[in-house]
Amino acid sequence: RTVDGMQEEGMPYTGVLYAGIMLTKNGPKVLEFNCRFGDPECQVILPLLKSDLYEVIQSILDGLLCTSLPVWLDNCAAVTVVMASKGYPGDYTKGVEITGFPEAQALGLEVFQAGTALKDGKVVTNGGRVLSVTAIRENLISALEEARKGLAAIKFEGAVYRKDIGFRAIAFLQQPR
């Protein structure tokens, strides 16, 4: 409705639009719109993009997206899990050393730093959402297993992360059709 309303008012929207949505017992509710990619949402989607992102965005700006749709990796699934500091979104400790980046990257994983800083040559926590680990594999179960290996490799005191990521999707995919 928002994009349609902008069109009706003579202000068509062109670009990235991120909608923060919460599922409630009364259905989905929009919390916010941002004119940017969502984080960590783009960290699980963009690694699957085979096309050049610049070219995709340029085709959107030129009004030609319908003639040059993005190409995605075939037969791949991605999982991204955020590692946060204990206490997030409330109070949390900063300045805690983070180790294990080389081990996670040796597994072929993408590690996206967010709430980190460099202090005395060491990577330390500096925010609530500290980093995220993205695994791309041939299926969702394999991607989830690899992401867990990366989470086990990266260590910092007070690290927390959701352990239920991907389970609903796996249950859905395993349902008889």
Image (spheres, rainbow, N blue to C red):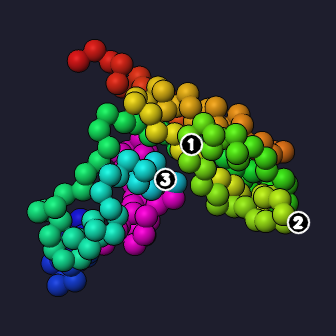
Question: Three-letter amino acid code at disc 1?
Answer: Leu
Secondary structure under badge 1?
loop
How many marks do you count on the picture?
3
Question: Three-letter amino acid code at disc 2?
Answer: Asp
C-alpha span from label 3 to label 1? 12 Å
C-alpha span from label 2 to label 1? 26 Å
Q: Which mark is residue 120?
A: 2
Q: Mark 1 highlights which residue?
A: 109
C-alpha span from label 3 to label 2? 28 Å
Q: Residue furthest right?
A: 120
Quadrant including the N terminus:
bottom left
Q: Residue furthest front?
A: 106
* Residue at horizontal 73 percent and vertical 61 percent from the top: 116
- Which segment is the magenta one? 15-39
Side of 2 where 19 appears, left or right: right
Side of 62 where 124 appears, left or right: right
Q: Mark 3 highlights which residue?
A: 43
* Chain-order first, disc 3 or disc 2: 3
* Chain-order first, disc 3 or disc 1: 3
Question: Three-letter amino acid code at disc 3?
Answer: Gln
- Magenta stretch: dominant SS? strand
Q: Position of residue 70 (x, y in %)?
A: 24, 56
